[in-house]
Image (cartoon, grey):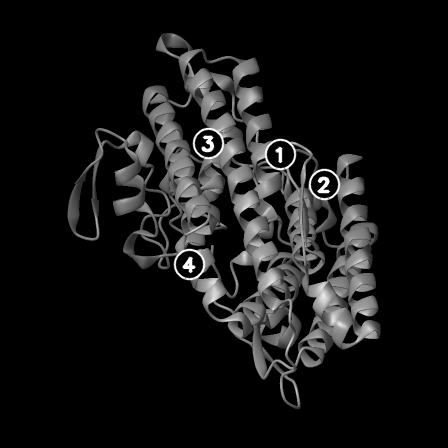
Amino acid sequence: MQRTMTATLALLAFGGAPAFADQAAVLTTYADIAHAGYEDSLTTAKRLQTAVDDLIAQPSADTLQAAKEAWLAARVPYQQTEVYRFGNAVVDDWEGKVNAWPLDEGLIDYVDQSYGGATDENEYAALNVIANPTFTLSGEEIDATEITPDLLEGQLHEADEVEANVATGYHAIEFLLWGQDLNGTEAGNGDRPWTDYATGEDCTGDNCDRRGAYLKAATDLLVSDLEWMTGQWAEGGDARTGLMEDEAAGITAMLTGMGSLSYGEQAGERMKLGLMLNDPEEEHDCFSDNTHNSHYYDGLGIRNVYLGEYVRVDGSVVSGESLSDLVAEADPAVDEALTGALDHTMAELGQIKTAAEAGLSYDMMLERGNDAGEALVTGAVDALVAQTREIERAVTALGQDQIGFEGSDSLDNPDAVFQ
């Protein structure tokens, strides 16, 4: 779910803005990294698309596993682009189609009885589109006999303006591949059987053909959405062109993306909030237990933007003039401190990743009384907050007039979380 942040961290810098000769080159690097990241996201989504087609054509434990592995690989470059969401309206307006979370999965498919049904907040929380070729939505009779990208995007996604009605994107696909994670804070992720895509008498969960149609429609839509965003950052694309029109505003967009993802979104909504609530439903990749990687690559995306360097999925490197170069020119001590803070954050996120890969998954870390898990998450949250303070200093060093970073009640007003 795209959450509405309830607090804003206003950063004020004093004095006139100094002129930096290389701002245009820095923005070019930023745009080049964006294009490369979205192009890599597209490439890996197309591999996922092929794996999904194979699963539907020849359902088996092997083809389901291959589709899962393709989904996991597709998350690596995409998460590194999330730093572009804040500060770039073209990305923020689009992002909800591809990465909205958490979702009421009962909208899409069958769920365990413990999930419950419709709620006051969401009338369609257990609609189960896959099981129902026709249904009423917001007073309108919907013909869903054919599940298409247009149906998902145009009628189901955020139906009735409820953000939890996520019908498209990575997490809808994740749910269709893994199924619900019913383990709470115990070990284990979703365990959807491959027979949910089987034909004839082997089909489990009913409606296997429609489940395959939904999975294909969602994956095809993800590919087309990423094709569009890749074009936005190509030479002549609207996102790139708009960025380069005003150099000062472009630098502001870079800093806004770094600070907002670092503070309110990642440290707050994605990490601190789940720890406060001890709620595995607050995981970012909750069906697959891939949250440790999502957090890690979000952090890496922030670092990529500051240092002006991105390692592509094929191992090649996109690099150039960077924000680090500008800050070092203005105040070398600030650049050194921010670079160190970014490295420290990646070390803390790396510890979470290592622990999860060794068997202590992120949802297990959120369990009340799990001191080791709490220490790991808290260490990363503290590093992200400290990193944001260094971004504030960079804002001042570069003479930015004012930047508003996204905030989070979990950090700014913790009592409100429990009201």
Report the residue marked by disc 4. 90
Of callouts 1 and 2, the N-terminal one: 1
Judge depth for marks 1 and 3 and give the one in front: 3
Q: CA distance from mark 4 to mark 1?
A: 34 Å
Res 327 seen here = yes
Report the residue marked by disc 3. 176
Q: Indicate the secondary structure of the residue bearing disc 3.
A: helix
Q: In the image, is residue 124 above or below residue 383?
A: above
Q: Residues within 10 Å of mark 3 (few under 14, many from 20)?
A: many
Q: Nearer the viewer, residue 204 or 197?
A: 197
Q: CA distance from mark 1 to mark 3?
A: 13 Å
Of callouts 2 and 4, the N-terminal one: 4
Report the residue marked by disc 2. 361
Residue 306 at x, y = what percent?
A: 69, 60
Of callouts 3 and 2, the N-terminal one: 3
- Taking the image as shown, residue 253 lies to the left or right of residue 54, namely right
Q: Indicate the secondary structure of the residue bearing disc 1.
A: loop
Of callouts 3 and 4, the N-terminal one: 4
| Farthest residue, direction bottom | 15
Report the residue marked by disc 1. 189
Judge depth for marks 3 and 4 and give the one in front: 4
Q: CA distance from mark 3 to mark 2?
A: 21 Å
> What amino acid is found at the position of numbered circle 4 in the picture?
Val
Specify the quadrant that holds the C terminus: bottom right
